[in-house]
Image: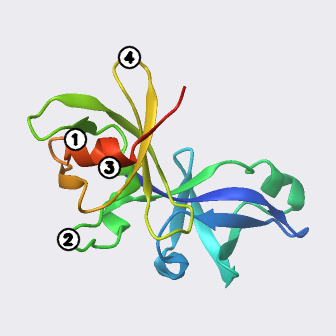
C-alpha cells in the first residue's frame, strides 16, 4: 500500500484517549472526509474529530485512555494514496518531492530534496543536500523552479536564480 502522511501526533489531549494532531496538509478540514488513518502501517478507525485553531483533535478506535494516546506522541498519521485529494496543476504532495533530484537547466544534478518546510509564510522552503553532503535551502518560487517531474523524480531549477536566493549550511 502506498501511503501519504497527513499529520503528526503532537500530544495526548485529555484523559479519554484523544490526540492532538498537527496537520501536514493545506486544509485541516480534509480530515473530515477520512474514515481510516494509518500509524506505522496499522489501521485506526476514526471515531471522532474536531478542529480548533489549526489543530486536529482525533479519537481513534483502540486508543481508549491518556496512556495509549501518549504512546502515539511523535507518530505520523497516513492515508492510503487512493484516498488522497486530487491536486491542481502546480501542486505536489511533499512526500513525492522528497528524494527528487534538484537539477539545473542542463540536467546537472545539484542535490536531492530532503524536506519541504511549511512555516506558514507566503512560500514553502525546499531543503536539499548536495552530493558532497552540503545542505542548502531555497524558496519554492515559480521564477526559480522551471519544472517538476514527479514520475522522473526531477526538480529543475534555474541555477543563476537559485544562487541568488539559496542558503547553504556551513
CA–CA distance in space, label 1 to label 4:
18 Å
* Between 88 and 102, the one nearer to me in the picture: 102
Residue 1 visible from this viewpoint: no
Residue at position x 43%, y 20% from top? 133
Q: Earlier in the sequence, mark 1 or mark 3?
A: 3
Q: Nearer the viewer, mark 4 or mark 2?
A: 4
Image x and y of residue 126, in percent: 41, 48
Q: Nearer the viewer, mark 1 or mark 3?
A: 1
Q: Nearer the viewer, mark 2 or mark 3?
A: 2
The residue indicated by pointer 2 is 89
Q: Nearer the viewer, mark 2 or mark 1?
A: 1
CA–CA distance in space, label 2 to label 3:
14 Å
| Element type at mark 3 | helix
The correct choice, above or below, for 133 with respect to 121 in the image is above
The residue indicated by pointer 4 is 132
Task: Locate residue 38 relative to residue 162 in the image: left or right.
Answer: right
Task: Locate residue 154 relative to residue 69 in the image: left or right.
Answer: left
The correct choice, above or below, for 81 with respect to 41 in the image is below
Amino acid at each position: 500500500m502506498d501511503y501519504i502522511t497527513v499529520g503528526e501526533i503532537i500530544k495526548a489531549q485529555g484523559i479519554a484517549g484523544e490526540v492532538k494532531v498537527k496537520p501536514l496538509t493545506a486544509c485541516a478540514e480534509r480530515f473530515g472526509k477520512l474514515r481510516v488513518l494509518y500509524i506505522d502501517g496499522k489501521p485506526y478507525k476514526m471515531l471522532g474529530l474536531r478542529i480548533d485553531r489549526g489543530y486536529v483533535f482525533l479519537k481513534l478506535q483502540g486508543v481508549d485512555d491518556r496512556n495509549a494516546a501518549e504512546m502515539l506522541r511523535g507518530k505520523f498519521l497516513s492515508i492510503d494514496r487512493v484516498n488522497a485529494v486530487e491536486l491542481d496543476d502546480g501542486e505536489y504532495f511533499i512526500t513525492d518531492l522528497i528524494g527528487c533530484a534538484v537539477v539545473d537547466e542542463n540536467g546537472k544534478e545539484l542535490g536531492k530534496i530532503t524536506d519541504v518546510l511549511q512555516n506558514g509564510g507566503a512560500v514553502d522552503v525546499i531543503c536539499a543536500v548536495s552530493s558532497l553532503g552540503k545542505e542548502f535551502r531555497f524558496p519554492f518560487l515559480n521564477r526559480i523552479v522551471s519544472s517538476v517531474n514527479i514520475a522522473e523524480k526531477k526538480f529543475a531549477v534555474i541555477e543563476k536564480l537559485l544562487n541568488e536566493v539559496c542558503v547553504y549550511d556551513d
